[in-house]
Image (cartoon, rainbow, N blue to C red):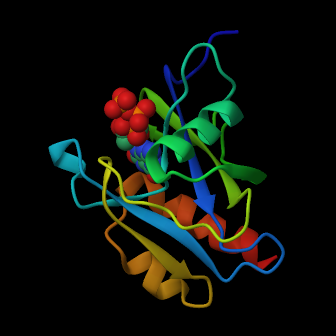
Amino acid sequence: MTAAYRTQVVGAALLDDARRPTAFLAAQRTYPEELRGLWEFPGGKQEPHESCEQALVRECAEELGVDVELLTEVPGPHAQGWPLKDTAAMRVWTAVASCGEPLPVVGEDHLAVRWLPLDDPAAALALPWIPADLPIVHALLDHLAR
Ligand SMILES: Nc1nc2c([nH]c(=O)n2[C@H]2C[C@H](O)[C@@H](COP(=O)(O)OP(=O)(O)OP(=O)(O)O)O2)c(=O)[nH]1
């Protein structure tokens, strides 16, 4: 089957706790220039040899230095997830650090990471997100409120 979106991106909504989450992690991009300073879900592009889930675990280890366990997908409107642009879509999973408290490190991909409290959706939504991510943040907050 041919994919509708040529580039499959995967993103993680890293939670502070699996059973009683109080916050999720957002990351501020360093590159490319047009996205610098905007906030996103840590993640990246799926490589040909891996599943989306494998790609996301790899990206979290590379970008944040955190081994993650994926929890549930935040389903988007398309089988490939959430459209980002004509050629790319992103699947998003909630996740937690595999061993205890996640202490993400800020690597080359990010200027900063920030825990966003789930009980203050307005503050989370007020960050300058990559515009395509805003519906995903809304859906995540709904997903976790259930
Ligand atoms: N990781 C991530 N990428 C996003 C989000 N929203 C969004 O539009 N994107 C876009 C930005 C990029 O064009 C693309 C993902 O590329 P990336 O640069 O994060 O992927 P990568 O780490 O595999 O990149 P690279 O090796 O090619 O530099 O998806 C998001 O929330 N997280």
View extreme (front): residue: 99
Could you tell whether 52 is left or right of 90 in the image?
A: right
Q: Position of residue 67 (x, y in %)?
A: 64, 49
Q: Is residue 79 visible?
A: no
Q: Quadrant of residue 128?
A: bottom left
Name the residue: 66% across, 38% down: 78
Q: Is residue 111 visible?
A: yes
Q: Position of residue 3 (x, y in %)?
A: 61, 17
Could you tell whether 115 is left or right of 1 in the image?
A: left
130 vs 47, nearest the viewer = 47
Name the residue: 21% across, 53% down: 36
Quarter that holds the C terminus: bottom right
Q: Quadrant of residue 13?
A: bottom right
View extreme (top): residue: 1
Could you tell whether 117 is left or right of 110 in the image?
A: right
29 vs 68, nearest the viewer = 68
Name the residue: 73% across, 60% down: 99
The answer to whether 104 is drawn above or below residue 142 in the figure is above
Instruction: Report the number of discs.
Output: 0
Quarter that holds the N terminus: top right
Q: Position of residue 102 (x, y in %)?
A: 61, 67
Name the residue: 70% across, 73% down: 142
The answer to whether 127 is drawn above or below residue 43 in the figure is below
Q: Position of residue 16 (x, y in %)?
A: 66, 74
The answer to whether 55 is drawn above or below residue 11 in the figure is above
Task: Write down which quadrant ligand 1 falls in.
Answer: top left
View extreme (bottom): residue: 119
The answer to whether 122 is drawn above or below residue 78 in the figure is below
